[in-house]
Image (spheres, rainbow, N blue to C red):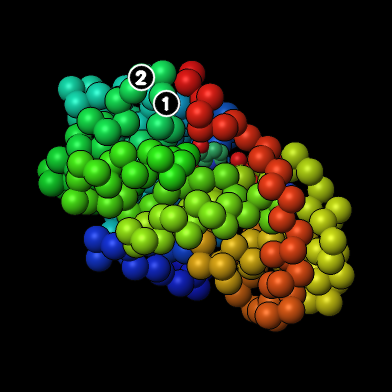
Amino acid sequence: MTDALPIPNLTLSDGKTIPQLGFGVFLVEPDEAERVVSEALEVGYRHIDTARVYKNEEGVGRAIAKSGIPREELFITTKLWNSDQGADTTPAALDASLERLGLDYVDLYLIHWPAPKYGKHVETWQAMVELRETGKARSVGVSNFLEKHLDDIAAVSDVSPVVNQIELHPAFQQRALRAHQEQWGIRTESWGPLGQGKYELAELPGLTDIAASHGKSVQQVAIRWHLQEGLIVFPKTTQRERMVENAAVFDFELSADEMATIAAADRDQRVGSHPDTTDF
Ligand SMILES: NC(=O)c1ccc[n+]([C@@H]2O[C@H](COP(=O)([O-])OP(=O)(O)OC[C@H]3O[C@@H](n4cnc5c(N)ncnc54)[C@H](OP(=O)(O)O)[C@@H]3O)[C@@H](O)[C@H]2O)c1
């Protein structure tokens, strides 16, 4: 096992810390997950982002167990699926995820989507806060919440989510939502940080030139941009050489002008689902 990568930690509003760069496993096939996560841990990642609905928690758990890495050196996130929302069902859903992961606790448990069809995001948040008290989820947060969903929970709960994990990449920068959630100290996690490969990062104005000037790929420039924006980011890849590439982002810095060039590349391009209509 190689050493952990030199990744900075950020402090969350509950006092816990999180490695700012991690590794995501959306669309990693269940029978590939153990190999992929084992390689990511070998490369030096220590923060893994999974979810019930990815159907790969068992493989993630096997990789963790085989790694021999002390549990306290890892940061593991999983997410509550929409149909499990509710005051009564949320605790059992976490227990089931822990069972699949082979863990006693997760570092971060998220409500995956607000899921308006169920109308339960507020009571679910209250259940998440109670789960934090059990220690089975060290920190609790949300994902894909819009301003109004954050307002709904702020109206009933003194506890703010530590993060909101939202779609965010250079063509979809979510400045308004980020500003809104900062009032409660909610950190932003970027999902789809490379645009999920649904557009070419190189087509955004300036990206190719910035990458060439640093001797880096456009993907590395994008990841570096997330980090310098203060975002938490966990690109996904099944390819070991890309795991290495995506973490080789601590030996260069984007200038203020380069950050401004990327800020100007925002074209409000959502590539994933909209939270108001994601009711599956
Ligand atoms: N909360 C949510 O609703 C939500 C939704 C989506 C994702 N997420 C989380 O966010 C994580 C990251 O988002 P994502 O997986 O959707 O998308 P992403 O990380 O933006 O993009 C992944 C895609 O980029 C490719 N890729 C990775 N590194 C590359 C590189 N260096 N050069 C070229 N291509 C590269 C991958 O292909 P290969 O695998 O072939 O390398 C894959 O097709 C997920 O894995 C998941 O943990 C959360």
Given residues 172 and 179, the one toward you in this image is 179
Task: Give coordinates of residue 238: x percent, y percent.
Answer: 64, 43
- Residue 141 visible in this rendered orientation of the protein: yes
Figure quadrant, ligand 1: top right
Picture residue at 74% right of the left edge, 75% below the top: 258
Q: In this view, does 229 lie above or below 178?
A: below
Task: Give coordinates of residue 250: x percent, y percent.
Answer: 60, 74
Task: Give coordinates of residue 246: x percent, y percent.
Answer: 65, 59
Q: How far apart are marks 1 and 2 (CA)?
A: 6 Å
Contact? badges 1 and 2 (CB < 8 Å): yes
- Residue 241 visible in this rendered orientation of the protein: no
Mark 2 sits on what residue? 118
Picture residue at 51% right of the left edge, 67% below the top: 230
Looking at the rendering, which quadrant does residue 59 occupy?
A: top left
Given residues 73 and 78, the one toward you in this image is 78
For badge 2, the amino acid type reads Tyr
Picture residue at 69% right of the left edge, 72% below the top: 259
Residue 92 left/right relative to 100: left
Given residues 238 and 180, the one toward you in this image is 180
Residue 210 left/right relative to 26: right
Q: Is residue 41 above or below residue 13?
A: above
Looking at the rendering, which quadrant does residue 28 occupy?
A: top right
Secondary element type, mark 2: loop
Picture residue at 36% right of the left edge, 44% below the top: 150
Task: Give coordinates of residue 82: x percent, y percent.
Answer: 39, 24
Mark 1 sits on what residue? 115
Q: Is residue 204 above or below residue 83?
A: below
